[in-house]
Amino acid sequence: MTNIKQSVTDPKRKKNLLNVKLIKREDITNDLLKIWIEKPNGYTFKPGQYCTIGINGIERAYSIVSAPYEKNIELFVELVPENEGGALTPLIWKLSPDDPITIRPRAKGIFVFNDQWQNHLLLATVTGVVPYVSFIRDYIKKIENHEVKNDRHKMHVLMGASYLDEFSYDEELKSAALKYPDLVAFVPSVSRPNESKNSDWSGTTGRVNMLVRDYANDNSLSPNDTLIYACGHPGMIEDVKEKMIPLGFTIDEERFWKED
């Protein structure tokens, strides 16, 4: 997802950087990109945490799409053009396979899966879906390895976007919901259904912060057994908090700013 922390410019810490290479890239739209980079030996993280990568000394933090068991680190990045203050993402857009990238040796972040709750209402805007993909990949792998049961938790993913081509992980999430209906429910929603780019859209419409209360009611989600996660645009998060905290819900949040 788009960077969630400010860059770090302390030159004393650069000696701790690890050198990796870009494995591959997948261009989604003109301003959305998936990249896969090498995972250093011994690099560990929890689903939902972020890594800090850099090019030519410019660093930013990105939530990790991949689950811990995967060979490489997958990231989902939104472009910020240079004329809008972009520093790292214009450099990422120029990358080709085998190009060098630096990564800090430790993943960080506390926006992680909380297994103390039965229901998990996961709200996202575009790149904000990243930690949830990691949650779900990790949990499905544990089901397949008979480490957990698939009826212990239910993850409800409400993903909002302006345009349908921004649903970069929709097929994966739809597949997970079909294969593991007791674990995953997925509702994508476009906020601009009348625009020509969405002419083929026939699904849910509206911003996720406008849908969350009805969704919770319709699915009998209670403040006693449901944790709400909100990841993405600060405006979405604030509106969700205003709507759901008075109803007794607990909210875990991770904000990002389009500033890199």
Image: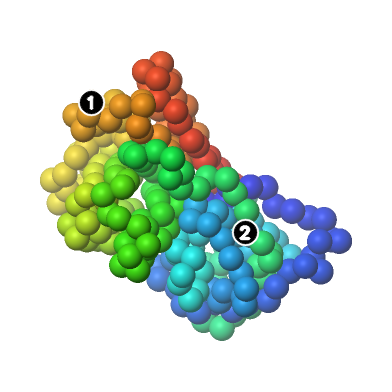
Give the camera-side residue of 78 and 35.
Answer: 35
Distance from Cα at disc 2 to Cα at disc 1: 36 Å
Numbered tag placed on residue 217 in the rendering = 1
Q: Amino acid at mark 1?
A: Asn
Position of 11 compared to 187: left or right?
Answer: right
Going 63% across and 64% down the picture, which residue do you hit? 53
- Tell me: residue 180, above or below residue 123: below
**Residue 184 at x, y = what percent?**
26, 50
Going 62% across and 77% down the picture, which residue do you hit? 41
- Tell me: residue 231, above or below residue 209: below
Position of 62 compared to 159: left or right?
Answer: right
Total marks placed: 2
Secondary structure category for the residue under label 1? helix
Give the camera-side residue of 131 and 138.
Answer: 138
Position of 184 compared to 64: left or right?
Answer: left
**Residue 205 at x, y = what percent?**
22, 37
Dot 1, how many residues are within 10 Å of its Cα: few (below 14), some (14-19), or many (20+)? few
**Residue 225 at x, y = what percent?**
35, 32
The reply to whether callout 2 and callout 1 are in contact (CB within 8 Å) is no
Q: Quadrant of residue 144?
A: bottom left
Labels 2 and 1: the sequence-earlier one = 2
- Tell me: residue 253, above or below residue 171: above
Numbered tag placed on residue 107 in the rendering = 2
Going 36% across and 18% down the picture, which residue do you hit? 247
Secondary structure category for the residue under label 2? loop
- Which residue occupies the extreme bottom position in the image? 98
Q: Quadrant of residue 156?
A: top left
Q: Is residue 69 in view from this perspective?
A: yes
Give the camera-side residue of 113 and 33.
Answer: 113
